[in-house]
Amino acid sequence: MRTARLTGRTAVVLVAHGSRDPRAAASTQALARAVRRAHPSWDVHASFLDHAGPRPLDVLRSLPGRRVVLVPLLLTAAYHGRVDIPAVVAEAASLPVDVTLADVLGPSPLLVDGVARRLGPARLDAVVLAAAGTRDAAARETITWAAGALSARLSVPCLAAYASAAPPDPGAAVSRLRAAGARRVGMATYFLAPGYLYDVAVRSALEAGAVSAAEPLGDAPELVRLVAARVRAAAGRTLPVAA
């Protein structure tokens, strides 16, 4: 950071992956509004690594002299969390802002709570937890953990599945559960926002016989609380934060 006097409220910049699907940006903006409502002392902004705008660096340039917590809206610490987000922070070093990077969102019990909320009260005897997918084995382990935690919460079998990059796909997971005797299999959703891969997951699960497919996490109250927890954890190291 260039030498500058820090002024104003703590700024929180949410960084989403971005999508060509306008529903994804709308969902991220809704989450930003929900965080802003819950924490009016924070100056909350949404940004996107790709496709939609604004880009994170553009938002940071608009906040000269500010303390900023950058929150990756990522469910795992895969490529975007390990490479793209740190690159943004490195480029921001030349700007007159004080940037602190928060952890990615997952894994967290709050995510499991939000997934269960979106799944709803339907009586199911098995669940598939559908995620976008990643080739990163460590990242997939966190999704497997989430599936196990959801299984314990709901007291039914739960399998992790992926719309891309890794097996099984949601349809294959539904078929496996049905072959094991489950009659009412629901698809839980480990997605923050709708988009192409979410639609792929829903179609795959329903075509294989799933009786329901949950909406993405979006602006679920649990996700708002998790974003706030990540802000506080990051800010506690270097920044004063008022909630």
Image (tube, rainbow, N blue to C red):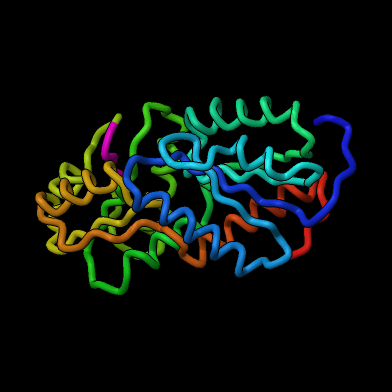
Left or right of 23: which side holds 18? right
Residue 113 visible in the picture: no
Residue 110, percent across and down?
52, 59
Residue 153 visible in the picture: yes
Residue 235, percent across and down?
76, 49
Front-lying residue, 168 or 60: 60
Which residue shows up at 78% across the image and 63% down it?
A: 242
Front-lying residue, 9 or 134: 9
Q: Please, is residue 201 above or below residue 211 in the view?
A: above
Q: Main secondary structure of the magenta part?
A: strand
Q: Which residues are magenta?
A: 160-164
Which residue shows up at 42% across the image and 56% down it?
A: 27
Residue 61, percent across and down?
68, 38
Which quadrant does the C terminus fall into?
Answer: bottom right
Front-lying residue, 102 or 87: 87
The answer to which quarter of the image holds residue 2 is top right
Q: Please, is residue 110 above or below residue 238 in the view?
A: below
